[in-house]
Image (spheres, rainbow, N blue to C red):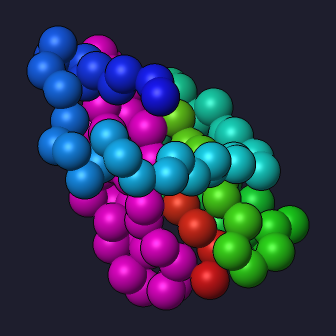
Amino acid sequence: MAVHTLRNGTRPPRWLADSTAVAIVIQRTLDLQGQTSTSAVECAARAMPELVPGELIELLTTDPCSVKRFAAWCRTTGNALLESSQFGNVFRFVIRKT
């Protein structure tokens, strides 16, 4: 049995440590760093028809406005925003096509 440790050095709750891990497969990644949030959403919209419902796309941006813009875009289109995170000045979004 593997011993799991969280990034902050603590152990996860027992129910999480004992659960079965699920692999997440991202079918496409778009590196949109340096583009405006409007341009990034337009690029994402153009990429979505290439995905099959249920597939995931990862988007990397540097525009802080992308956080609100991708959340609104997902609500409007019905696609699921699974992750919105920030690492330094890079914003990462994982969206599931519905």
Residue placed most toward the observer, 25 or 20? 20
Q: Is residue 48 left or right of residue 3?
A: right
Number of numbered discs on residues? 0
- Say if the magenta span includes residue 72: yes
Residue placed most toward the observer, 61 or 78? 78
> Which residue lies most toward the front here?
1
* Magenta stretch bounds: 64-93
**Measured from the top left, where is residue 43 in percent x and y?**
66, 54
> Which residue lies most toward the right here?
50
Relative to 86, does residue 83 appear above or below in the rendering?
A: below
Residue placed most toward the observer, 32 or 11? 11
Identity of the residue drawn at 69% across and 74% down = 54
- Say if the magenta span includes residue 12: no
Q: In terms of image quadrants, where is residue 64? A: top left
**Measured from the top left, where is residue 71 in percent x and y?**
33, 66
Q: Is residue 66 visible?
A: no
Q: Quadrant of the C terminus?
A: bottom right
Identity of the residue drawn at 52% across and 35% down = 60
**Measured from the top left, where is residue 33 in percent x and y?**
52, 27
Identity of the residue drawn at 77% across and 50% down = 27
Q: Is residue 89 left or right of residue 73?
A: left
Relative to 38, does residue 30 appear above or below in the rendering?
A: above
Identity of the residue drawn at 80% across and 68% down = 51
Q: In terms of image quadrants, where is residue 86? A: top left
**Measured from the top left, where is residue 80 in percent x and y?**
47, 73
Q: Is residue 3 visible?
A: yes
Q: Is residue 82 left or right of residue 22?
A: left
